[in-house]
Amino acid sequence: MARAKPAAPRALALPETLDAAAAPGLLDSLRSLRGGPVEINAAQVKRLGGQCAQVLLSAAATWRADKARLTLIEPSPELAEALRLMGLTPDSLTHGDAAA
């Protein structure tokens, strides 16, 4: 029996500013992508606030619970620095294949 081919990841490009005002929209975007693999492109992020960091951490936990892949690609230096100041890393926002 042929093994099913994994679904191609859907993409989400993060905006330049991820502040408190952006958190509800980010949450809605992630909710709409739930249920399959997702690639989050963070190349344009210049500012990351606490609420959006919480939304992204929650997404990583949700994808982990769903046994789906969540990948952060091209994290900007500003995003990496903001995460570092929060005691996190870009890897904190991802979840690899649960099959491992």
Image (tube, helix red, strand yellow):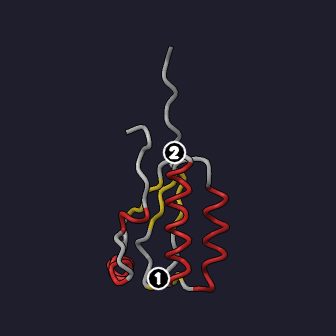
Give the quarter of the figure containing the C terminus: top left
| Neighbours of disc 2 within 10 Å: few (<14), some (14-19), many (20+) | some
Residue at position x 43%, y 54% in the image: 95
Question: Horizontal placement of 92 versus 36: left or right?
Answer: left
Q: Which amino acid type corresponds to the residue marked 2 in the rendered image?
A: Lys
Against 71, is 15 above or below? below
Q: Which amino acid type corresponds to the residue marked 1 in the rendered image?
A: Leu
Q: Which mark is residue 67?
A: 2
Q: Which residue is mark 1?
A: 48
Q: Secondary structure at mark 1?
A: strand
Residue at position x 49%, y 36% in the image: 6
User: Percent from the top left, x then y, of residue 51?
Assistant: 56, 80
Q: Nearer the viewer, mark 2 or mark 1?
A: 2
User: Percent from the top left, x then y, of residue 19?
Assistant: 55, 85
Residue at position x 41%, y 50% in the image: 96
Q: Secondary structure at mark 2?
A: loop
User: Percent from the top left, x then y, of residue 40?
Assistant: 48, 62
| Neighbours of disc 1 within 10 Å: few (<14), some (14-19), many (20+) | many
Residue at position x 49%, y 76% in the image: 53
Against 97, is 75 above or below? below
Are the two marked residues, 2 and 1, in contact with CB atoms closer than 8 angstroms? Answer: no
User: Percent from the top left, x then y, of residue 15?
Assistant: 52, 77
